[in-house]
Amino acid sequence: MKTIIQSLRMFAVLTVLTGVLYPFVVTLAAKAVFPRQANGSVIIVDGKIIGSELLAQRFANANYFWPRPSAGDDGRNYATVASSASNKGPTAGDLKSNVTARAVAFREAHGLNPDAPVPSDMLFASGSGLDPHISPEAARLQTERVALGRRFSAEQRQRLAALIEQSIEPPQLGFLGEPRVNVLKLNLALDQLK
């Protein structure tokens, strides 16, 4: 009986320490040191929340840069609640057919040759299905479609190309990952392009 009481006391103490106090202290510290990130890296435009830098949003209009495919895409928007990968492996027949269909659609939408290479991030969903970034190459390949959709002049096309280059984020800490472009931030900057 004595060991049961000791076990229950230990359980209660550890629950309070690790389940209440530790998360509370870490949350307060994060909000004090990194307030923007601790609150979800939310992007606000004209007093309205537009989205988060950390989550992809669906852009299907020809006037905008498209994000990478998402396993959580239901055709209307990205299902952020049920985010996950498709969990399909290299032997899954429908994975191959999905990737082939995405490649054909991307090439057609961008006026590329039928055998032109397509960046892999435009063919495969990310692990979470909500990656907000695409490769600089994928952004550059979409330039002509966006410029045509917006009826940009030659001067505006040059500014668009410069905007893409300015939007490239370097690898984290200079060596983790690859250079990338946040699609939501790029599209918001695109709306400001004159």
Image (cartoon, grey):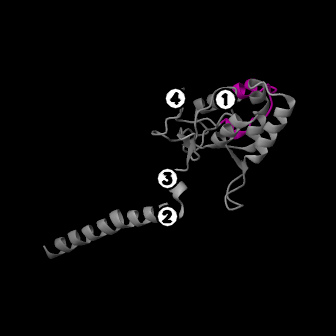
According to the picture, the residue beneath numbered tag 2 turns out to be 32
According to the picture, the residue beneath numbered tag 3 turns out to be 39
Q: Distance between the residues labelled 1 and 2?
A: 44 Å
Return the residue found at the far left: 1
Q: Tag 4 or tag 1, which sits nearer the N-term?
A: 4
* Three-letter code for the amino acid on which mark 3 is drawn: Asn
Residue 19 lies, with reference to residue 40, above or below; the image says below
Q: How far apart are marks 4 and 2 (CA)?
A: 37 Å
Q: How far apart are marks 3 and 1 (CA)?
A: 34 Å
Residue in the picture at 62% in, 29% down: 98
Tell me whether the residue at label 3 lies in contact with that at label 1, contact meaning CB atoms closer than 8 angstroms.
no
Measured as percent of width and height from the top left, residue 93 is found at: 59, 30
Q: Distance between the residues labelled 3 and 4?
A: 27 Å
Residue in the picture at 63% in, 28% down: 60
Residue in the picture at 59% in, 33% down: 58
Mark 2 neighbour class, 10 Å CA radius: few under 14, some 14 to 19, many 20 or more: few
| SS class, disc 2 | helix
Tell me whether the residue at label 3 lies in contact with that at label 2, contact meaning CB atoms closer than 8 angstroms.
no
Where the C terminus falls, by quadrant? Answer: top right
Q: Distance between the residues labelled 1 and 4?
A: 15 Å
Residue 38 — which label? Answer: none
Q: Tag 2 or tag 4, which sits nearer the N-term?
A: 2
Residue 74 — which label? Answer: 4
Measured as percent of width and height from the top left, residue 55 is found at: 56, 43
Magenta run includes residue 31: no
Residue 102 — which label? Answer: 1
Quarter assignment of residue 51: top right
